Image (cartoon, coloured by chain):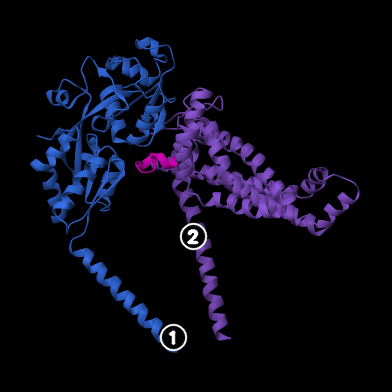
C-alpha cells in the first residue's frame, strides 16, 4: 500500500511538472520555419543571430523542400514556409509571399572539368540528354552525367523554368535530394554537372559562365546573370506576433546584411 | 482470479490494437493508391517507364526493375556471406571466437541505415567510380550496402535452422567416416534447407523495403538499368524522394507505388512462412 501511494504521488508530481512545462512553452512559442533546403542554411544562420539577440524567443528551422514548406503552412504545421521558386498560379491565392532575398542558380562542375562557359542552349542539351559527350561543348572526350534534384524541389522547378523551357530533364540524370548531396557528387565525379544555389557553392566546385556572364551576386543584381530566382518567406494571411518579429528581423538591415555576406542578393 | 482476467483482457486489447493498426494501414494504402492504378490502367502503370508527375505520366516499370535488380544482387552478396558466417559460427568456429563474432554480426542490425548509406557514399561509391567506371552510384553500390545490412537476418536465422537439425544426423554422418565439411554440405545444409530459404527470403524482405541507405547510393535515375554499374531508382526511394512534395494525382501515384511494394513484400513473407512451416514439419517427422 505504501509503495502504491508513493508511486501515485510521483506520478502526480511528474504530471504537474509536465503541465508546468507545457504552459511555459505556450507563452512564447518557437516560430516554426519549414521548407526549401536551399534557404534552410541561411534561415538557420538568421535564426541563430535572432535568438542570440532575443534569448527568450525561439526559432525552429526545418528542411523538407519548397512544396513541403507550403503544405506545412497550409496545414498550420509551420508559421513560415521557405520557398525557393515563384509561386504557381494555383498557389498564389492561398499564401502571402514576401521576397527575403534573391539567389542565383549556379551551374557547377568538377574542378577537373575544362569547360568554363556554356550557353543556355548547351545547358539545355546537357540536361535533356541531347548532348552526351563533353567534347561537344568544348571539353575533353567523356560522358556527361547531369545531376538533378527531385521532383518538387524549388531549385529544380526554378531550373526547369529558367533553362529547360519545354524540354524535359533526361531520365538518365542522377537525382539527389539536397543541395549538399549534389555538391558531394559533383565534387567527386569529373563527368558530373549540377545546379545549385549560388550562395552554397563551395571552393571545391567550379562554376560555369552562362552566356558569357560570370555567376556572381553583382551580376544577379545587375540582371545580367539570367539564372536568378527569389527566396520567399510564405505565410497564410498575417503571421502571429512571434513570427512577425522574426520576419521583421530578416528584412531588417542587419538580417539583409547577413544574407548578403553569405552570397545572396538583397531583397530590395 | 478476477485480476487475472482483467490483465488477460487488457493484453488482448493491446494485441488487437496492434493488429488493427496494420489493418488500417493496409486499407488506407489501398484506398489511396488503387484509384490511380485503375485510372492510368495497370498496363501503363506497371509496364511503362515514363514517370513524369508534372505532366501526368505515372509508369513505375523502371523502379520495379530497379528494386528487383538491387534486391537480387544484394541477396547474392548477403547469402554468400550470411550463410558462410552461419556455417562457420555453427560448425567450424572455436566456441570462444563464436562468442565474439556472433554478437558483432548482430550489432550490424543496430546501426541506423543512414550510417550505412553515408559509409557507402564516401567509400564504396568512389571506389566503384574509380576502378569500374560509371557514376559510382549504382546497382552494385546499393547491393553491397544492402548485402551487409541483411547479414544479421540471414546469419542468425540460418544458424537457428542449422541448430534445429538433430545432432544425431551430425554424429551419424561423422561415424560413417564423412569429413566435417562433407557432413556440413551433404547432411546439415540439406536438412536445414527450408529454414535457410526462409532466412534468405526474410532478408530479401528487408532489402526490398530499405529506403534511406538506397537513396544515398543508388543514384535514383528513372531508367531501367542495363548493367550493375548503372544507377537505379527503387520503389521505396521513389516514395521517400517525392512524398514530401506530392499532392493530388502525384500523391496517389506514390501510394500506388506503396501498394506495389506491399504486394511484393506480402508475397515474399508468405513464401518465407510456408517454407518455415514445411521445415518445422520435416523436423518433427524425423
Q: Residues within 10 Å of mark 1 (few under 14, many from 20)?
A: few
Q: Any idea which chain is the purple one in this picture?
A: B
Residue A239 shown in magenta: no
* Residue A22 picture location, percent across and down: 26, 67
Residue marked by disc 2: B21
* Residue B64 picture location, percent across and down: 53, 35
Q: Residue at x 10, y 42 (%)?
A: A254
* Residue A45 picture location, percent across and down: 21, 44
Q: Any idea which chain is the blue one in this picture?
A: A
Q: Which residue is drawn at 17% across and 37% down?
A: A259
* Residue A13 picture location, percent across and down: 32, 78
Q: Which of marks 2 and 1 is in front?
A: 1
Label 1 chain ID: A
For the record, the magenta segment spans: B239-250
Residue marked by disc 1: A3
Label 2 chain ID: B
Helix, strand or loop at mark 1: helix
- Residue B256 seen from this side: no
In this view, which residue lies farthest toward the right? B176
The quadrant in which residue A186 appears is top left
Image vertical order of residue B133 relative to residue B247, above or below: above
Q: How far is mark 2 from mark 1, CA to CA?
A: 35 Å
- Residue B178 seen from this side: yes
* Labelled disc at residue A234: none
Q: Is residue B120 left or right of residue A54?
A: right
Q: In this view, does A45 lie to the left or right of B84?
A: left
Amino acid at each position: 500500500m505504501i509503495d502504491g501511494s508513493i508511486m501515485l504521488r510521483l506520478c502526480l508530481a511528474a504530471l504537474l511538472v509536465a503541465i508546468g512545462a507545457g504552459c511555459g512553452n505556450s507563452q512564447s512559442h518557437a516560430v516554426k520555419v519549414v521548407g526549401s533546403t536551399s534557404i534552410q542554411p541561411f534561415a538557420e544562420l538568421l535564426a541563430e543571430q535572432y535568438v542570440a539577440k532575443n534569448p527568450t524567443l525561439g526559432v525552429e528551422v526545418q528542411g523538407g523542400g519548397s512544396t513541403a514548406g507550403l503544405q506545412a503552412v497550409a496545414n498550420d504545421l509551420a508559421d513560415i514556409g521557405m520557398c525557393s521558386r515563384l509561386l504557381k498560379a494555383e498557389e498564389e491565392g492561398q499564401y502571402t509571399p514576401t521576397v527575403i532575398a534573391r539567389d542565383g542558380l549556379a551551374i557547377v562542375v568538377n574542378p577537373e572539368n575544362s569547360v568554363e562557359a556554356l550557353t543556355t542552349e548547351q545547358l539545355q542539351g546537357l540536361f535533356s540528354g541531347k548532348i552526351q559527350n563533353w567534347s561537344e561543348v568544348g571539353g575533353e572526350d567523356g560522358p556527361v552525367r547531369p545531376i538533378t534534384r527531385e521532383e518538387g524541389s524549388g531549385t529544380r522547378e526554378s531550373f526547369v523554368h529558367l533553362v529547360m523551357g519545354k524540354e524535359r530533364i533526361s531520365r538518365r540524370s542522377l537525382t539527389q535530394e539536397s543541395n549538399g548531396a549534389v555538391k558531394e557528387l559533383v565534387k567527386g565525379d569529373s563527368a558530373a554537372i549540377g545546379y545549385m544555389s549560388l550562395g552554397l557553392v563551395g571552393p571545391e566546385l567550379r562554376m560555369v559562365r552562362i552566356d558569357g556572364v560570370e555567376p556572381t551576386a553583382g551580376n544577379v543584381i545587375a540582371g545580367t546573370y539570367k539564372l536568378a530566382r527569389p527566396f520567399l518567406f510564405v505565410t497564410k494571411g498575417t503571421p502571429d506576433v512571434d513570427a512577425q518579429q522574426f520576419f521583421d528581423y530578416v528584412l531588417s538591415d542587419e538580417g539583409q546584411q547577413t544574407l548578403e555576406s553569405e552570397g545572396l542578393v538583397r531583397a530590395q | 482470479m478476477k485480476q487475472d482476467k482483467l490483465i488477460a483482457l487488457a493484453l488482448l486489447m493491446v494485441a488487437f490494437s496492434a493488429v488493427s493498426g496494420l489493418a488500417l494501414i493496409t486499407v488506407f494504402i489501398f484506398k489511396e493508391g488503387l484509384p490511380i492504378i485503375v485510372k492510368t490502367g495497370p498496363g501503363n502503370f506497371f509496364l511503362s517507364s515514363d514517370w513524369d508527375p508534372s505532366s501526368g505520366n505515372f509508369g513505375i516499370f523502371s523502379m520495379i526493375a530497379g528494386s528487383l535488380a538491387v534486391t537480387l544482387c544484394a541477396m547474392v552478396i548477403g547469402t554468400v556471406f550470411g550463410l558462410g558466417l552461419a556455417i562457420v559460427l555453427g560448425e567450424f568456429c572455436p566456441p570462444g571466437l563464436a562468442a565474439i563474432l556472433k554478437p558483432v554480426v548482430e550489432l550490424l542490425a543496430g546501426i541506423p541505415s543512414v550510417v550505412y548509406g553515408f559509409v557507402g557514399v564516401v567509400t564504396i561509391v568512389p571506389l566503384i567510380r574509380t576502378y569500374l567506371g560509371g557514376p559510382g552510384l549504382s546497382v552494385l553500390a546499393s547491393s553491397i550496402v544492402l548485402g551487409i545490412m541483411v547479414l544479421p537476418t540471414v546469419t542468425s536465422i540460418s544458424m537457428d535452422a542449422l541448430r534445429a537439425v538433430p545432432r544425431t544426423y551430425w554424429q551419424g554422418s561423422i561415424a560413417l567416416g564423412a569429413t566435417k565439411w562433407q557432413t556440413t554440405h551433404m547432411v546439415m545444409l540439406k536438412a536445414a534447407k527450408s529454414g535457410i530459404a526462409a532466412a534468405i527470403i526474410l532478408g530479401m524482405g528487408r532489402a526490398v523495403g530499405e529506403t534511406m541507405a538506397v537513396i544515398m547510393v543508388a543514384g535514383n535515375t528513372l531508367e531501367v538499368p542495363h548493367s550493375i554499374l548503372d544507377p537505379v531508382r527503387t520503389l521505396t526511394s521513389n516514395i521517400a524522394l517525392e512524398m514530401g512534395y506530392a499532392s493530388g494525382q502525384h500523391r496517389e501515384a506514390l501510394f500506388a507505388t506503396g501498394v506495389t511494394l506491399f504486394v511484393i513484400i506480402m508475397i515474399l513473407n508468405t513464401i518465407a512462412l510456408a517454407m518455415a512451416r514445411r521445415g518445422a514439419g520435416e523436423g518433427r517427422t524425423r
